[in-house]
Amino acid sequence: MFSGLPARVALTVLAATGLLAAAPSASTARPAPAPVSATAADAPSAVSSSAVSPFSVSPSAGSPSAGVAVKMPAAVADRLGTDRKALVDAVSADVLSRSHDAGGLAPATAVGRLAAEGRKVVVDVRAVSRDWARGVAYVEAPRTRHGEPEGWLYIAHREDGRWVAGLEGDREFAEHVARSPLVGEAERRTMTAYAERRATPPAQAPRTQVSPAGAQANVNGLLLPWMPDYYMTLTGGPHAHDSGSGYWSALDFAGGNASGLVRSSREGTATSMCGAGGGWTRVIHPGGFSTDYYHMRNTTYYNGTSIARSALLGSIGTDTCAGGSATGAHVHWSLRTYDANYNGQYTWLNGRTIGGWTWWNGSGQYSGCGTRLGVTACPGTAIYNRTG
């Protein structure tokens, strides 16, 4: 069912804010019923676009970047010159080796199979400085079903005439963060702490396992993705980030009295994974966790930007800029970590307390519930976001 590898690569040069877009899993949003609260409760961007100028190159069929979509600001393309293909090759090779859907396949085979499903591998080069480059790379999710893209921040360094790329979770990424002039001091503190929370990958185990005793509060005070003491409706309980295999790391929310505004679960550094106007943002928090927010509209553009807790990210929406599908306006929120033997992966929610609610898997994906002070909230229930 798979087609062959495309023969040419089209690279679109965007102005500094012209980047990409992505999105993933969803459940049908329902009207918000009366809110449930375990305590007393009450209620609480514009992006620019620029003209684009395309150019093309013709890499060899064996090149890791053959068939990969590339975007970069015009100034970055000019600065890289003929070296841009080598950079994209290095990042593409890492992306294809790390991708769940492409890992273990030759680059040409992997990109060809993804293309046959209408999916792209995207390398977004956002900044360069001498021998350093940084950006975002991702593999689009299938558009025929609920699911999310796989995405990584990356930093690359030119060493002895070749580019060495590091994606989130790689040893090289942590090393590059510590040294790259493209990483500011505040971002470095957060990203280094996050990237260094690495350990030996776990032995094979059921991915819907209950978290170990004592793990419930080990999320460093993360909130649900809207303002504290306001409510949204839970439209999907714990489920895998791709709605397939993997730890059940994601929740879906819609409606409520928070005006549909999506906000960061904690302070950290934020990156708009799809670029300006895209509905996918990742926030890296201190202490080993990060959170993803999908399907948003009216998003605020961030590029490694330091933000406060509850910073505005966008509004609930149906954006599918990097694949997946959405059947109603909502935010798809998911938890990632490098701690406790989970090397740069989406991690379990089961038994963890977020926004004052402890989350539990159901008998199937999307059916799980949250509990708080003796109250149980399952899909279709409006819940308040609590700080304690």
Image: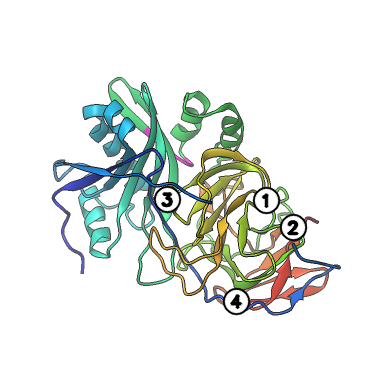
Amino acid at the residue labelled 4: Ser
Camera-nearest residue between 42 and 122:
42
Name the mark on residue 310.
1
Q: What is the C-alpha distance between the residues marked 2 and 3? A: 27 Å
Q: Position of residue 138 (x, y in %)?
A: 38, 50
Camera-nearest residue between 262 and 49:
49
Q: Which of the two discs, 4 and 2, sits closer to the camera?
A: 2
Amino acid at the residue labelled 1: Ser
Looking at the image, residue 365 lies above or below residue 213: below
Which residue is disc 3 drawn over?
A: 274
Q: Position of residue 291 (x, y in %)?
A: 58, 52
Callout 1: helix, strand or loop? loop
Q: What is the C-alpha distance between the residues marked 3 and 1? A: 21 Å
Callout 3: helix, strand or loop? loop
| Local crowd size for mark 3, using a 10 Å CA cut-off: few (<14), some (14–19), many (≥20) | many
Name the mark on residue 121.
none
Q: What is the C-alpha distance between the residues marked 1 and 4? A: 27 Å
Amino acid at the residue labelled 2: Pro
| Local crowd size for mark 1, using a 10 Å CA cut-off: few (<14), some (14–19), many (≥20) | some
Looking at the image, residue 348 lies above or below residue 134: below
Which residue is disc 2 drawn over?
A: 228
Q: Which of the two discs, 3 and 4, sits closer to the camera?
A: 3
- Residue with the most extreme right position: 40
Confirm or deny contact between disc 2 and disc 1 (CB under 8 A): yes
Q: Earlier in the sequence, mark 1 or mark 4?
A: 1
Looking at the image, residue 54 lies above or below residue 293: above
Q: Main secondary structure of the magenta part?
A: strand
